Each structure stands twice: as structure tokens, then as C-alpha cells.
Amino acid sequence: MIRYCESGCLYTKVAARTSLAAIVAVALLLGLAGTASAHHGIATVGAAGLEGPGAPVETSSSATLPDGSALAYLKLDYADFEKFDRTRSDETKSNSFWIAGLGYGITPYLSGYFFLPYTQKSVEDGPGGNSGIGDASLLGVLGFKYYRGLQLVEANESLDDLEDWHFTVYGGLSFPTGEANVRGPANSGGEISPGFATGFGKPSFTAGLTATKTLTERLSWIQEVSFLRFQSYRYDDGVLRRFGDEFRINQALSYRLFTWPERSARLDLNLEANYLHLERDRSNGHPEQGAGGRIGYLVPGLRAYWRNSSAGLAVKLPIVTDLNEDSLQQGAEGKENFRLIFTISVLQGA
């Protein structure tokens, strides 16, 4: 699925005043975010050069890959969960979501991406976790800007051009390459547990809009709205399940702390606010208990750039939660102690 995610990672070629080559700064999340009865995801996109707009970690920026360029990306999203009952050993302890991605600039305004996630899930003080390849996905991104009207992104934009409003429209789908019929911990009955699966059984679909605006020479404002929809899938136990759809609104501020032109390097400070609305999961057409709700996250982080490479580090904290049947959602989104997010990317051919 796309989480993302996760979620593609995007980059825009910048004609900088310093006449230095533009460097990539990528923000992508496409992976599996485990919950007690489901796992969800988004795709995020973003990029920047030595000068120009910044790129957050969880919020997609409005940029596309240079024509004919290729991008390699790797991300880790580590989630540490609250414990509800210290006497139990089958509660979710942590999840590690890895995602590898490849992007290609088809035109200056159109980019395509392929992602393959890998998930590791563990339980507290006992066997029964799971790991494996998740659902592969494809994502396409179309870039626009507004200057005396809406127009497609051009090949080489000046810093003045980058001060205009920029937008992207993206869409994608996943393929059921992960394992859906996974059994839970033995001490919990060993029944099929979708929360421990690495796949969804059927394709999922995502769509989103982004907008980016430079507010000052160093400060950028980034916004994103996205939607993720799942399909019903009949598991080997005969139950027809459908994971709840996801709706996200993200806001971010990216501030350029330092630039070292002689080293083609840059360091940004990011502050993001993420809102996630989860619909209830459904079994045989009926809404499930202990699923769905609303979550507000705060995500402070840093992004560093060097030549054609980028690395990002952020901590994602649930600040406000309103979960359905809260006490039944151990291991769900919104029940993390924290998430630690690390990304690294390299651009070739720009």
C-alpha cells in the first residue's frame, strides 16, 4: 500500500544564485503503520536545493524530479508503543517499517515512483511477532505552479520562480505482494491477525494534493491533503474484512538554518503538525470495536543536504488523540510513545 504513506520522494532542479548545482532533499514515507487490527500508510513527497523551499519529513512538498533523473531512497520508521497491561506478553512492543524506493523524472512536471516496504513487528516478552515484504506500490506526481494563472512546472526554475505557489496532484495504487493471512501470537489463540500481517490481500488506492509557498528567504510553508482507500478481502478464516479509509491533513514549516555554498551543503529545521482521521475497520460488513479515531501529531526534525544526497531525522509524537474504544487499541496509531523517522536519498542524472 502507499503510505504512505506512506505515501513518493520528489526533487526539483534549482538554478541557484550561487551558480552551484542543485542538490536533492527528499521527504518520503511509504510503509506499513501497524495497529491493533490494521496497518495503514501514506506517501509523502518533497525536495529542495541549496536555496529555495524546504522539504519536511512527513508532509509532502510540491516538487518533481528533473527530467531524466533517477532517485534512490531508503527510510526507517520505528514505532515504540505504550503498554496497557504489564501482566500480558502478547501486546505490541514495537514496529519497524523500512521502505526502499526508486523514482524517475518522466518530464519536468511528471514523476513516477516504485516502492517496496519491509516490516518488522514484535510483541512484549514473547514470540509471535512477524516480519516480511509488504505490498509494493506505484505512484505518479504531476507538478504545477501559479504565476498569472495555473501552469505546468518548467524544466529550470529560478529562485524567483520558486517563490511562486507550487502544487502537486498525486495518485497511486499498491499490489498484494505482502502476506495477509498471518496468525497472531500463540498465547493469543493463534488465529489470523490482520494487525500482524504485512499485506492487505487486495490493492489499495491513494490520492493527494500539496501546496508550497516560500514566506521569506529562509522560511517555507507546506500543506498536504490526502486520502487512502482499502478494498474488502476475504481471509482464510472466512471473514470478509476491510480496513478503514484514512484522511490526512498535514502542515509544515521548514526553516533554512545554515548554507555552506563552498561545500554544497545545507541544514534545515522542520516543524510539522499532522492530522489523521481513521474510519472504523469492518468485518463481514459490520464496524469493528477498538478501531478508528482521530489523532494529532507534532513532528520536529532536521534535514541535511550534501551535494546530491539528503538525510532527514524526525521524532513523531501523538499530542491529541480521540480513538474509538481507546482501551482496546494497544499497538494502534495514536498509541505510540514515539516514532523515530530516518531517511536517506541520492539523486543521479540531474
Image (tube, helix red, strand yellow):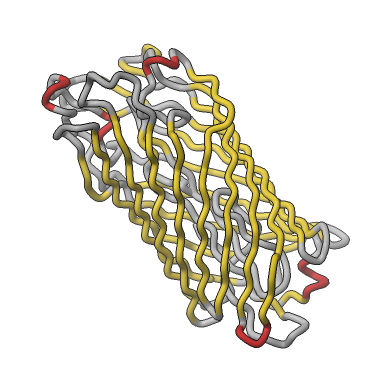
33 is higher (above) or lower (below) than 172: above
Q: Nearer the viewer, residue 34 or 83?
A: 83
Residue name at image x 75 percent, y 60 percent = 145
Question: Within the image, what quadrant is residue 191 found in?
Answer: top left
**Residue 197 appears in which quarter of the rendering?**
top left
Give how far across and how far down residue 316 sits, in percent.
52, 43
Q: Residue at x 42, y 55 (%)?
A: 138
Q: Which residue is rendered at x = 53% and y = 71% of the image?
A: 105
The vertical placement of 335 against 348, above or below, is above
* Left or right for 62, reference 350: right
- x, y percentage for residue 215? 82, 57
231 versus 199 height, above or below: above
Instruction: Report the number of numbered marks.
Output: 0
Q: Residue at x 51, y 74 (%)?
A: 309
Q: Quadrant of the C terminus?
A: bottom right
Work out which residue is located at the far front of the displayed protein and give it: 86
Quadrant that contains the N terminus = top left
Place of residue 19 in the rendered image (x, y in percent of width and height, measured from the top left): 72, 87
Tell me where residue 208 sits by quadrant: top right
Please state the horizontal and vertical placement of residue 163, each as a whole percent of the image: 80, 64
191 sits to left or right of 76: left
